Amino acid sequence: MSPRPAPPYGRSRPAARHRTARPPRDPRPRHGHAGRTRYAFEAHPEDDDFIQPGTLYREVMTHTDRDHLVDNIVAHLGQGVERFIQERAISDYWAKADSDLGRRIAQGLKRGRYEAGQWLT
């Protein structure tokens, strides 16, 4: 077999067009497999993404496990991560899971104290 000739301009077909924005979701129910009706997800006020990690930290992990977790987070956040990103990670994620965890990470990064949703110097 002889090699196949290269397509013109290096492409065999036009480049894929990427959509930058999706159309709005239709809120009406859709009928899926076996006659089941599917609805778009709606968040409830009592939904909280931080209850389970906070319970894991407080009630499941041993003191040694908590120390290792804090050491790992501090080590990774301390490797060339800008200060505003460190502060946002602590206030938006770690402190919401558990205030003690957020405080210990802030102390490990030497960022002052984080209490009641604000930075104290």
Image (cartoon, grey):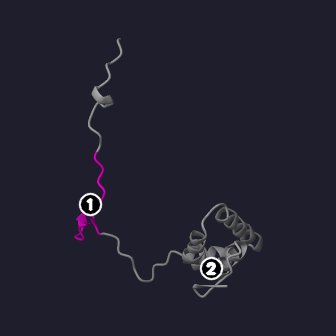
Residue projecting furthest to the bottom: 116
Q: Position of residue 16 (x, y in %)?
A: 29, 43
- Residue at the spot of label 2: 98
| 108, 47: nearer the viewer | 108
Verify whether residue 38 appears in magenta: yes
Q: Nearer the viewer, mark 2 or mark 1?
A: 2
Magenta range: 17-39
Image-quadrant location for residue 9:
top left
Image-quadrant location for residue 58:
bottom right
| 6, 62: nearer the viewer | 6
**Relative to 44, does residue 12 appear above or below in the rendering?**
above
* Residue kind at label 1, given as amino acid type: Gly
Q: Main SS of the magenta segment? A: loop
Image-quadrant location for residue 108:
bottom right
Residue drawn 45% across and 83% down? 46
Which quadrant is the N terminus positioned in?
top left
